[in-house]
Image (cartoon, rainbow, N blue to C red):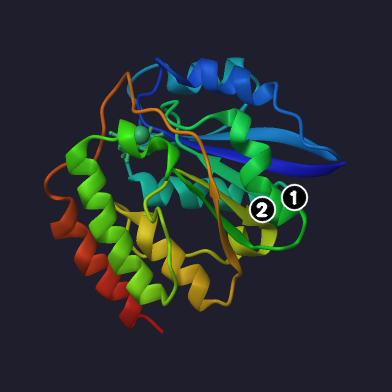
Amino acid sequence: MKLLAVVVPAKDEEATIGELLSRIARVRVPDHTLRAFVVDDGSSDLTSEISSRHGAAVLRHPTNRGLGASLLTGLRAAVGAGADAVVYLDADLEYSPEDIPLVAAPILSGRADYVLGSRFPHGARLMKLSRRLGNHVFTALLSLLAGRRISDGQTGMRAFSREAADRAEIIHDYNYAQVLTLDLLRKGMKMEEVPVSYQPRKHGESFVNWTYPVRVLPAIWRELRSP
Ligand SMILES: Nc1nc2c(ncn2[C@@H]2O[C@H](COP(=O)(O)OP(=O)(O)OP(=O)(O)O)[C@@H](O)[C@H]2O)c(=O)[nH]1
Ligand SMILES: [Mg+2]
C-alpha cells in the first residue's frame, strides 16, 4: 500500500475540523492508505484536540505563522512520513474531501506533479462578487506570468507528487497561492487543473481582507526575481 497524505492547515477551525476528518476517513483511493496531517497554526480553540481524537497526525505551530508556512510544514511532514503523494485542502469545508480522488488522479497516474482543484465553473456563482473579481484579476496575472491559461489561481485544494511536495518553496506566508504555482512551474513540474466542488465558508473567519493586493503583489515580484 502507498501513502496518500492529506494536509489540512487549520487556524481556529473547531467548528468544522471534526466533520472534515470523519469525511476524509471515509474516502477510498485504490492501493493507497490515506492519512490526515493537520497543521494547527497557533489556534486558541480545540482544533488540535479534536484532530488528535480523530486519529490525525497533528503538527503544531506554537504561534500563528500563516497559511503558506502551515502548508509547507504539512508538505514536509508528509514527505518525512514517506508519502507517495499529497493532497492539501482547507479546513473550513469549502472544499469536499470526496473530491480527493479526483485531484489526486493526475498525480497517481503519473501525468502531473501538481494539480489545482479549480472552483470554476461550478462554484463561481456562489462566490462573493468582490472575491470573484479579485480572483479573476490575480488569476489573469498568474496566467500571464506562468505563460499558460489557469482558471483558479487561488484555490484551497491542490495535489502534489512526492517530488513536488519535497521541492516546493513558499517565499511569502500570507499568500502562498500564486508564488507556490510559479515556484513549481519554474522547477519544471507538470501542472494540471481539475474542476472541484465549492461551497462558501459558513463558520469561522476568513484571513482575506482589503490588504490582500498590497501584500500579494510584492510577493509575486520577489518570487520572480529569486534565482
Ligand atoms: N485565517 C487563517 N487561516 C489560516 C491560517 N493559517 C492556516 N489557516 C487555514 O487556512 C485555510 C484557508 O483560510 P481561509 O480563511 O478559509 O481562506 P479563504 O478560503 O481564502 O477565505 P474564505 O473564502 O473567506 O474562507 C483554512 O483551513 C484556515 O484554517 C491563518 O494564519 N489565518
Ligand atoms: Mg476558506
- What residue does disc 1 label? 82
Q: Do the residues labelled 2 and 1 touch (CB within 8 Å)?
A: yes
For residue 41, what is the image quadrant?
top left
Under tag 1, what secondary structure?
A: loop
Q: Where the N terminus falls, by quadrant?
A: top right
Residue 11, x across and y down, in percent:
36, 31
Q: Looking at numbered disc 1 in the image, what kind of residue is underneath it? A: Gly
Q: Distance between the residues labelled 2 and 1?
A: 5 Å
The reply to whether residue 63 is visible in this rendering is no
Point out the image quarter for the C terminus. bottom left
Q: How crowded is mark 1: few (under 14 residues within 10 Å), some or many (20 or more)?
A: some
- Residue 189 appears in the figure: yes
Residue 149 sits above or below residue 154 on the image: below
> In the image, what residue type sits under mark 2?
Val
Q: What element carries label 2?
A: helix
Front in this rendered view, residue 213 or 103: 103
The x and y percentages for residue 209 are 16, 42
- Count residues near mark 2 (Cα–Cα under 10 Å), then give few for <14, some for 14-19, many for 20+: many
